[in-house]
Image (tube, coloured by chain):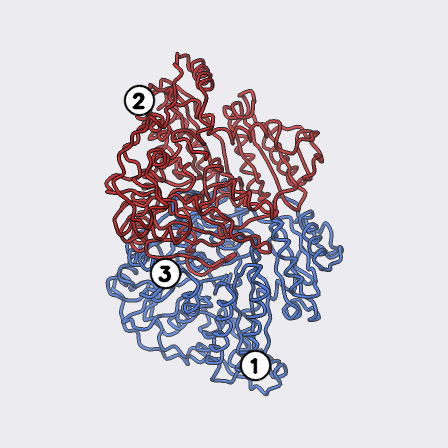
Chain colours: A red, B blue
Amino acid sequence: MVKRSFWAWGHESDEPTAEQMKSAAEELSKRYKVDLTPVTPPTPSSLSLRKPRVTPPSSLADICVSDDHDRAVHTYGRNFRDRIRAFRSDFPNPPDVVARPRNEQEVEAVLEWCSSSGYAAIPFGGGSSTVAGFEPPDGYDGIVTIDMEGLNQVLEIDDVSRSARIQGGIYGPALEDQLRPHGFTLRHYPQSFEFSTLGGWIATRSGGHYATNQTHIDDLVESVRMVTPSGLWESRRLPGSGAGPSPDRLAIGSEGILGIITEAWMRIQARPVFRASAGVTFPTFAAGAEAARRIVQTKLWPANCRLLDPVEAAAAAGMDGTKALLVLGFESAEVPQGEFIRHAVNIAREADGAIDDAVVRISDGSSREVSGGSDRGTGRQGSVGAWRNSFLNAPYMKNHQAGLGLVTETMETAITWDRWPAMDQMVRSALQDALDRVCGGGSVSCRFTHVYTDGPAPYFTFEGMGRLGAELEMYAEIKQAASDAIMAAGGTITHHHAVGRLHRPWYDQQRPELFAQALKAVKRTLDPNGVLNPGLLIDA
Amino acid sequence: MVKRSFWAWGHESDEPTAEQMKSAAEELSKRYKVDLTPVTPPTPSSLSLRKPRVTPPSSLADICVSDDHDRAVHTYGRNFRDRIRAFRSDFPNPPDVVARPRNEQEVEAVLEWCSSSGYAAIPFGGGSSTVAGFEPPDGYDGIVTIDMEGLNQVLEIDDVSRSARIQGGIYGPALEDQLRPHGFTLRHYPQSFEFSTLGGWIATRSGGHYATNQTHIDDLVESVRMVTPSGLWESRRLPGSGAGPSPDRLAIGSEGILGIITEAWMRIQARPVFRASAGVTFPTFAAGAEAARRIVQTKLWPANCRLLDPVEAAAAAGMDGTKALLVLGFESAEVPQGEFIRHAVNIAREADGAIDDAVVRISDGSSREVSGGSDRGTGRQGSVGAWRNSFLNAPYMKNHQAGLGLVTETMETAITWDRWPAMDQMVRSALQDALDRVCGGGSVSCRFTHVYTDGPAPYFTFEGMGRLGAELEMYAEIKQAASDAIMAAGGTITHHHAVGRLHRPWYDQQRPELFAQALKAVKRTLDPNGVLNPGLLIDA
């Protein structure tokens, strides 16, 4: 059986080889003009976790495990702090039990056990949280992590309404595999796609494939079925309603504090056939931003409208570091997309963008391209294709750099267009100052992952060389400076995926205080013993 | 000063003349083969309301009134039951005081007075509720209706982000008047547009102009500012976020039970320039529904995609009663819409729709049409134009029929496509059975007002001739039968605008029971004395 790595992105087979670690060390040594010694990754034998403090009741014994490897895998997500601590085999507060219910009744039984015993019950999807979304809390006598991977089926497809009833524990690839034979797709592709689940996407308000219009999983949810300690919460399947506040919108983004999402009816669609893509270059990031703003405000709704600043365009798409790149993509199952991309490209050109007509790629879905001069499928070559591969591989590449002292992270937000120029300046300067102070320098870059008529979702990346053993403190200082700047500029502390433990201090500044009070009242109603993912979003 | 009619749709000047009442009586006499006597509408002198039971504190005296006419206007909305009772001058439980705060501080002061005195505090927008959304509750010693008309300004326009900060009490026409000089529009046009407010739209999850994609006010809200008895609730302006459940989505649809919406940042847009429209006929309603489904599932996102069954097509668009009519409209400030409508028309034709190319109207916004052979502006003539006028005039026309015994109402819902054929049959047959039983016959018709990828929003109209004096009981029996059928078929009890007192019994079947518990807990937090619009959505 393929096992997940307890420290790296992916499975154990994805852990880097000695050769890969060596060349990463060489590459970083060169980049930072330091002399880095290649390291040896930890192995499961280095794990020595606190003994499990609780024993499941015999009725649940079949679905519970407490071995060190499994508990380590369920302790941390995959952000920078997680990788550092896991690489050090530093797991002071692991779950005591990992439960893997096979059906809803077993989810209920596990929750009931936790609720009556006062044990923290931590819902677990694909394990790729970057915000400490399932990291166990301190102060509990028992911690039970509930891994939903057993609820992994597309249960029903309604091809007339283009909807599907899908279990919460299904991973991205399995979900698509089960829809594909029917000609459908959910088309929700967060970067964590391989290691995240439908239930996780809903609980974290995941941002997905589409750069415009229906960007978040929120928009794809038709109804939600959620097990809570107070009973079952299930909304009616409805395409729309005006009846009271939306129950679904309270479950969406609830980060496991109100219940565990066992099923949802999701809006699916026919697989795209017609595609068009273009990579438009700009003299500056600001010029590209202006083009993105105008394109989204025309409501052409491109599937992709991602803007890379010159640093990112160089790193991800092999450009020369002097120009920004706007990656445009249109797609449809039924409608040729040529007119759409031509219109978007025209807007981009009016905003100082440059692209040859010959590299605007338009495809009707057969193996040939209608225009664009290649036979290899639209959007999978040239600057656009380079960006795609980079997007999917990025988390794996970080594995190679583990244990070398690098301090790096990505941070996403959203902001209205009027405040964006000031935010760009504030966050970049906060990051650069912090990197200079903490690491003696480093790099900052930015891209837009999604754009709305009223503002972009900027995604910042920073990197500096830290001191081995001090990375966590160095990271914390940089992260704090950038997060404070995001808040001061008027942004959200997360656009893509949840608050988690990591972003609580800034979330608390962001949400209305009365909303926090309201959410506490809701939690007391649904989870009277306060066992579900304690400390997320609100204090107990 | 122009005064609102206490019984009719509109102002006193919109009340029908004796001649209009007479011809309505003649028309109905003919239609139902009965002999109806024209009636004389009530006048303000016929009002004799319960004496006000409470006196506002002197600090609020300037903004409070208690005269009979004003209290009558603030007692009922404008659905069938309201019209009947108001026409009878039957106002047993009017508000004691109508307060008109001029700013947020005065909203707070009025709420504080109500909260500390235990008086019911009823937020009032434009007064056009069709679900008894602001009708005073029984069992209170004092009832204060808070008319928000004084907060009627567009306070700020952010033309870069295409957003505007707008006060909650502004009426539809004033809102558009204040945006127009800046080249912007909200483009939210419920049928109540003239007599409804931004705050009302948000509190009722109003369905608006767009038949597809962003249909509800929900999608246009960037942030909400709401005064509650526990303090101010204000969300951050954000184009998108993944940080916890959306605070806005809890305020949207809260029907005045959690707070009073004083301001919101709304997503606005450039005024449309390019338009295209087409009226496609179908041999059956089902064939038209299939076309609407295919069009919305292609995600061409027409602004209008409304389907009238043969009865409605005859009444509203002058057709011959044998064919259904699909009204398609596209619009954009920047992009010519010819390709879009041609594509939609092609889909409609593949689904058995008929239309001549010559009557597909395409306009570039200048006085001339690009095609379609008329110089009078797209979508304002022919079958499409007839439908438009009918839509805007419908509420006024009902004034003429008052007091003649007619029992008539509209009911809207939403349902997934797979269940729609059964719902169509169930609701029509429940309505026809009830009309036959109660009125000895009557007519039932249906249209789709909005369509989603996963289902339509059907809108039923029924009409029968009742007995004078017994209309309310007859109406209640028909309404009950239809609402039960909507629930049994799997729909929502309201798609367009709120639950109100009228729809509570069916709403209670629709929402998850645990959501009701959660909402109660939220209300206790925000409105600890339970004074805000008591009895709406949940019991105290």
Chain holding disc 2? A
Numbered circle sitting on residue B436 = 1
Kindly identify which residue carries mark 2.
Answer: A470
In the rendered image, residue A411, in percent from the top left (x then y), is placed at 41, 32
Residue B188 vertical position relative to residue B11 in the rendered view, above or below: above
The local secondary structure at tag 1 comes to: helix
Residue A268 vertical position relative to residue A357 in the rendered view, above or below: below
Kindly identify which residue carries mark 3.
Answer: B516
From the viewer's side, name the closer residue of A295 and B504. Answer: B504
In the rendered image, residue A116, in percent from the top left (x then y), is placed at 26, 52
Circles 1 and 3, Cβ within 8 Å, touching? The answer is: no
Chain holding disc 1? B
Residue A3 vertical position relative to residue B168 in the rendered view, above or below: above
The local secondary structure at tag 3 comes to: helix
| Residue depicted at 33% across the width and 77% down the height | B50
Name the residue type under label 2: Ala
Q: CA distance from mark 1 to mark 3?
A: 36 Å
| Residue depicted at 55% across the width and 59% down the height | B416
The local secondary structure at tag 2 comes to: loop
**Residues indicated by labels 2 and 1 sit on the same polypeptide chain:** no
Q: CA distance from mark 2 to mark 1?
A: 82 Å
Q: Is residue A518 left or right of residue A187?
A: left
In the rendered image, residue A97, in percent from the top left (x then y), is placed at 32, 41
Name the residue type under label 3: Ala
| Chain-order first, disc 1 or disc 3 | 1
Q: Callout 2: 10 Å neighbours few (<14), some, many (20+)?
A: few
In the rendered image, residue B318, in percent from the top left (x then y), is placed at 68, 69
Q: Is residue B14 left or right of residue A146?
A: right
Name the residue type under label 1: Asp
Q: Is residue B35 visible?
A: yes
